[in-house]
Amino acid sequence: MSHDDDSAQCYEGVTFSPWPVLRLRHCYPRRRRHHDSRSEETTSPCRDGGDSRGQPEASTALAAGDTDDSVSPASTNVTATNSGNLTVSFTALGQTITVTCTSTTLSLTTPASGLAVNLQPPTVSGCTDNFGGTETVTTSGTWLLKFVDARNDSTLAEPNKGDHLRLTVPTGGATVKSSLLPCTISSTQSTVRASYNDKNKAKFTNQMVSGSGCGGSNTATFNGTFLTSINVSDSAS
């Protein structure tokens, strides 16, 4: 009696996000055909939780960093203002333009639990460029800030190497109108990273923000240092 075995196919997929990730194991069933009886038998190749129909098995995996941490103080209004100038450099219409802004303020309420929080759109003013022009920066939408603690650092003194912030700028969240240009440049969704001293100072160094406008796609280089109005740190729960 002859039969054919279709090889089993399994794969694992991991979704990365600011939250604990979901690990899915997808298993497709093995089919065994008996040619003499014209019958077909389906068995599962999954030995760790998939069922005979090939349904995925869900299990929890830890995201990078200490997932049991929270922000201290919780549920508290905080502002962050630039220390020194904020600069953004980009190329438009064949010219490299560096915009320098003297005043930038971010406002947020620290989360009641966890390490991520939505920001109010920042306010940016006092912007000029290296060609003598002036810029108007308009912000909108939902900006996301995530405190990222170094992995498995609960026994170490803060701040740790690896502690940082991640700021997600939404699509259309920032637009730049320059007196030099007949067009407007608008951000597309980007996430930038800042070093953080787990107290009151965040520093963005050569972070890339994507955008579009003025006849094409643009990638801006962003630099800036911010100080918070009060000390903010992560704390293990």
Image (cartoon, helix red, strand yellow):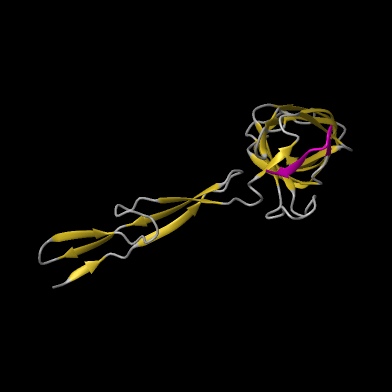
Give the quadrant of the C terminus: top right
Which residue is rendered at x = 63% and y = 37% of the image?
188
Membership of 129 in magenta stretch = no
In the drawing, does residue 29 fall left or right of residue 99? left
Residue 141: percent from left, percent from top: 65, 28
| Nearer the observer, 78 or 183 | 78
Residue 41 sits above or below residue 81 on the image: below
Read off the magenta span.
226-237
Give the quadrant of the N terminus: bottom left
Residue 202: percent from left, percent from top: 80, 42
In the drawing, does residue 215 fall left or right of residue 205? left
Membership of 231 in magenta stretch = yes
Q: Residue furthest left?
A: 37
Which residue is rendered at x = 68% and y = 54% of the image?
151
Which residue is rendered at x = 74% and y = 55% of the image?
155
Q: Residue furthest right?
A: 84
Q: Is residue 177 visible?
A: no
Residue 191: percent from left, percent from top: 67, 42
